[in-house]
Amino acid sequence: MFTGLISDVGVIRGADRGRFRVACSYEAASIAIGASIACDGCCLTVTRLDVDGDGKTVFDVEASNETLSRTTLGKWLASRRINLERSLKAGDEMGGHLVAGHVDGVAEIAGVKSDGCSIRYEITAPPDLAPFIAEKGSVTLDGTSLTVNRVAGNLFTVNIIPHTLSVTTWGRKAAGEMLNLEVDLIARYVARLMGKTQEATR
């Protein structure tokens, strides 16, 4: 489990048919083989760990065809910057919201504009996921826990403050970019239970 609070920005060193090498600022000694790290919101398992000549930690992860089909990972190339988050430990502060790291689909940035001291992003959600997104609810985009401002059909908006822009990849995002989208866990399960209830009463 994760919280959607980004703790580092990694750089893709290599990408080959679902296998990725990621350079990061985490201490190598703190990462175990088999550990889970959310990479742009996608929970991936560390399969190899190295330290390069500059002392930078480099880890390998692999993605299944299912993951590649539901996320942006299939288009990742070397030099891409990605948001990283380590998995929760017992006793960690619970900021953000509960994030599984199981990406539901891909959303698109429809517009970007200044809004006071923050930046407002208009996001287009896939039609099948839009019903799970609610005003003032939580959503995870490229691993970042965000609060939904407004919803209009498949379009919703989020505001991002300067601090978040500076410590994540959001400061470089522009209209037309695709994002990994994970809807709120509670919304997903409530919808599933309501569907089962309706089926039982027919």
Image (spheres, rainbow, N blue to C red):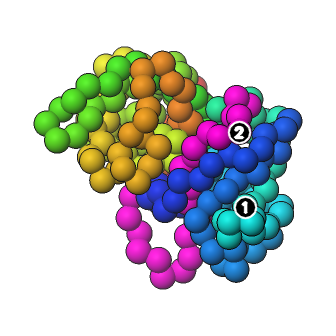
Percent of width and height locating residue 37: 65, 60
Please tell me whether the stretch drawn in magenta is mainly helix, strand or loop: loop
Determine whether the residue tagged by mark 1 lies in a helix, strand or loop. strand
Identity of the residue drawn at 75% across and 60% down: 59
Q: Is residue 92 magenta?
A: yes
For disc 2, the neighbor class at 10 Å (few under 14, some 14 to 19, many from 20) is some
Which residue position is annotated with label 1?
Answer: 58
Amino acid, disc 2: Ala
Indicate the quadrant where residue 178 lies: top right
Q: Within the image, what quadrant is residue 137 found in?
A: top left
Residue beneath disc 2: 78
Residue at 26% x, 25% y is 113
Which quarter of the image is occupied by the C terminus? Answer: top right
Residue sticking out furthest to the left = 116
At 56% across and 76% down in the image, what residue appears? 89
Residue 130 against residue 55 in the figure, above or below:
above
Q: In this view, does 105 lie to the left or right of 185?
A: right
Which region of the structure is painted magenta? 73-101
**From the viewer's perspective, is residue 99 above or below residue 51?**
above
Residue 68 among those drawn in magenta: no
Picture disc at residue 67: none
- Determine the CA span between mark 2 and mark 1: 13 Å
Percent coordinates x, y for residue 154 in the rendering: 41, 19
Q: Report the residue at 35% width, 46% height from top.
A: 165
Tell me if I can see residue 200 in this picture: no
Q: Residues within 10 Å of mark 1 (few under 14, many from 20)?
A: many
